[in-house]
Amino acid sequence: MNAFILALFQRKHKLKSTTLFQVLIGRQTSSVLCYAYFNDLLPYFRSFPELSENDFQQRLQTLTKQGWLQAVPLELHYYEITTKKPKEETPTFSHLNYFRFGKKEKEVWRLIQLLVQVASYLGKSKEYLPIESSPYSLARMRYFVRQHKAVLRATIYEELTVLLQALEKEQADFLSQSFTGHQQNGLAFFQLLPEAYQAFPQDKFYVSNSLHAFFSELEQHQEFLLYQFVADLFAENRNKSAVSSIQRFQEGMTLAQISQQRRLKQGTLHDHMIEWAISDEQFPFQAFLSAEQYDRLQQLPANSWQYPYRTLHLPPEISFFELRLYQIQEKRGTKC
């Protein structure tokens, strides 16, 4: 765990410890989400929801005593890496996306495994023990099978083939060996982990990296039965209140109307819109920022999110909310 924390600092050099902790446990506020987004930490958002602040601070102190980190002078709670070089590189997991998939990754994968098992046995045998014993999951499965029984077995096989072929071979092999079906007993992830990834948290990241790669590909095929079976769980990864606000805005309501109808403060709605902007590359920035505001905002220095707000000297007609939207668009590289 200490090596992972150090790796985050190596990527960004300097980080605010209090906010980094909130990113790792997944505190769902716009300020924390923006910090994660601007510092390329979004893939790790909510990666350690049970991490205690005391444990985290102790690890920072240990890394400081060992000479890997040092407190930044005159900047409260900020730490930076020292010139001391690590003995070994921390593995990079390029498909991690805890922000998008982490909250429900285990439940989604378990349901996919169950669907694969049922499809495999369909028409061959009724004598098997389902890998899932939850009454809700089994009832959900029975309903889904009744809807698609005629095509389920062949369709799931075809969909899995498409999805696994789109992954890296190592990931595809890792995930496919965990499936249980007719004349095949799947292995647990801990049995399949390569030796180099047996220790925590590398074991956790290796599994999640493979799952998130699969889920990301699955989301590109929303017509698949596999996607339709778990779509509602994918939706539960998102902030439900934010989703409700976004839906109303897309239906044509103004922020003022949404605020009145949902009895939400303006700041809360702004948080919802910022979360939407961060998570959706198709976010309609032009609906919130006028041409005049763009002209003024484009006078800011490049990478403006790296500057303290007070040093940007923005006029009062440009709100902090509008600044953040501009900076999200700037970071994404899609400025008008």
Image: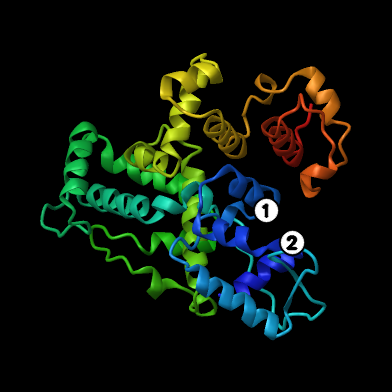
Q: Quadrant of residue 311?
A: top right
Q: Nearer the viewer, residue 229 or 314?
A: 314
Does dot 1 land on a helix, a strand or a loop? loop
Q: Quadrant of the N terminus?
A: bottom right
Is 157 situated above or below 292? Answer: below
The amino acid type found where label 2 is placed reads Lys
Nearest the viewer among 138 and 35 is 35
**Residue type marked 1:** Asp
Q: Could you tell me residue 216's position as x and y percent?
A: 51, 46
On screen, residue 116 versus residue 189, left or right, reads left
Left or right: 224 in relation to 99: left
Numbered disc 2: secondary structure: helix
Left or right? Give the position of 305 relative to 230. right
Residue at mark 1: 40
Q: Position of residue 76 (x, y in %)?
A: 71, 64
Outermost residue toward the bottom in this view: 66
- Which residue in the rendered view is the most extreme toward the top? 252
Residue 317 falls left or right of residue 172 = right
Check disc 1: other Cα within 10 Å, few if <14, some if 14-19, many if 20+.
few
For the residues bearing labels 1 and 2, Cβ distance under 8 angstroms: yes
> Residue 12 bears which disc, if any?
2
